[in-house]
Image: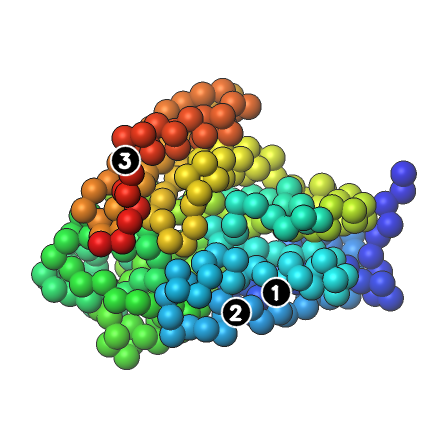
């Protein structure tokens, strides 16, 4: 079957949030599609969609609906036919998609590590007791307090540029950002230090871009198949199975990372009490094709060790 390629007269409409990082990810998707099919830039239209998560910045995500706040309006527009595909940061994506939508295309994964960002301090070891650290991530907050309970954590939402301004304004002495985002924005210099996964395991799917489409859109399916990165897909299948079995959301501190070595997959997972007072971790390997089963098994093991009420707010 001949693939119906987009044209300037009938472009493929790419939905995205409007932050500089979201736009950079949409532009990367467009570049890869242009290269795969030798198409001009105007065969694609980038459509910016304002989400609730972008509009409401003065409250923690857990208070206003969790991860879906960054995707709901975009997915509604796709189901209504106003856009054809949607580009997402995978660490923001719920583990289940709305009926009629499919998420099965991933671009090659970027650096998975967190970056330590501060106008003055060079790393966590430089922070005096009582120093204010800004983050909106429950995972980072719990990991930080588990290692440095002497620090104060303050709410710190917004895009990369907003968070950097908050640091300049003295809202906090430091924060954490994903290295992947800094790399994609050409802002690697902002990182004072990178934090190894052994010190701070990243969020599930951190560093990965996912592209969502309608299940019945054969044109989009054919286009996206050409730019899908298989290794990233296999890693995320294990990580997201782990997250799904834990019922992960923005209200639960969960970290996970899968890595490939030939035909072997290594999965590391961590769950934490919300106040950082306890962390439980596991580290296992399996055949690559068994990654999702391992993710579910690891989640069951950690939940069994955690017991009832582990994620309860304190």
Give 130 or 271, whichever is nearer the viewer. 271
Q: CA distance from mark 1 to mark 2?
A: 8 Å
Secondary structure under tag 3 reads: helix
Residue drawn at 29 percent across, 38 percent down: 308
| Residue 16 in view here | no
Circle 2 packing at 10 Å, graded few (<14), some (14-19), many (20+), is some
Query: Mark 1, mark 3: which one is toward the viewer?
Result: 3
User: What x and y, as percent, mark residue 56?
Assistant: 46, 73
Q: Determine which quarter of the picture holds residue 174.
A: bottom left
Q: Is residue 105 above or below residue 167?
A: above
Query: Mark 2, mark 3: which one is toward the viewer?
Result: 3
Circle 1 packing at 10 Å, graded few (<14), some (14-19), many (20+), is some
Secondary structure under tag 2 reads: helix
124 sits left or right of 21 in the view:
left
Pointer 2 residue = 52
Pointer 1 residue = 73
Q: Is residue 17 above or below residue 246?
A: below
Give 78 or 181, whichever is nearer the viewer. 78
Question: Dots 2 and 3: beta carbons under 8 Å?
Answer: no
What colour scheme was applied to this rendering of the protein? rainbow
User: What x and y, as percent, mark residue 182?
Assistant: 43, 59
136 sits left or right of 280 in the view:
right
User: What x and y, as percent, mark residue 105?
Assistant: 64, 44
Residue drawn at 70 percent across, 56 percent down: 85
Question: Dots 1 and 2: beta carbons under 8 Å?
Answer: yes
Q: Is residue 285 above or below residue 62?
A: above
């Amino acid at each position: 079957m001949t693939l119906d390629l987009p044209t300037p007269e009938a472009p493929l409409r790419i939905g995205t949030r409007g932050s500089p990082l979201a736009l950079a990810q949409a532009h990367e998707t467009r570049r890869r599609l242009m290269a795969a099919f030798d198409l001009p830039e105007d065969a694609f239209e980038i459509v910016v969609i304002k989400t609730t998560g972008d509009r409401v910045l003065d409250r923690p995500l857990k208070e206003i609906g969790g991860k879906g706040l960054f995707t709901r309006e975009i997915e509604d527009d796709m189901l209504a036919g106003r856009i054809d595909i949607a580009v997402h940061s995978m660490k923001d994506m719920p583990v289940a998609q709305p009926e009629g939508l499919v998420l099965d295309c991933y671009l090659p994964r970027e650096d998975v590590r967190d970056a330590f960002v501060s106008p003055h301090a060079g790393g966590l070891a430089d922070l005096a007791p009582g120093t204010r650290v800004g983050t909106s991530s429950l995972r980072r907050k719990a990991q930080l307090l588990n290692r440095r309970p002497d620090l104060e954590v303050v709410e710190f939402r917004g895009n990369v540029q907003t968070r950097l301004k908050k640091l300049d304004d003295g809202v906090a002495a430091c924060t954490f950002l994903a290295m992947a985002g800094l790399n994609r924005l050409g802002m690697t210099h902002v990182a004072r230090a990178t934090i190894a996964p052994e010190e701070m395991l990243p969020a599930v799917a951190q560093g990965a871009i996912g592209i969502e489409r309608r299940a019945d859109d054969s044109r989009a399916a054919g286009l996206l198949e050409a730019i899908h990165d298989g290794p990233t897909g296999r890693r995320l299948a294990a990580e997201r199975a782990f997250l799904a079995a834990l019922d992960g959301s923005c209200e639960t501190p969960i970290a996970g990372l899968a890595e490939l070595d030939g035909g072997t997959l290594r999965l590391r997972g961590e769950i934490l009490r919300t106040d950082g007072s306890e962390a439980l971790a596991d580290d296992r390997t399996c055949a690559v094709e068994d990654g999702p089963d391992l993710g579910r098994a690891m989640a069951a093991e950690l939940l069994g060790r955690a017991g009832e009420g582990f994620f309860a707010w304190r």
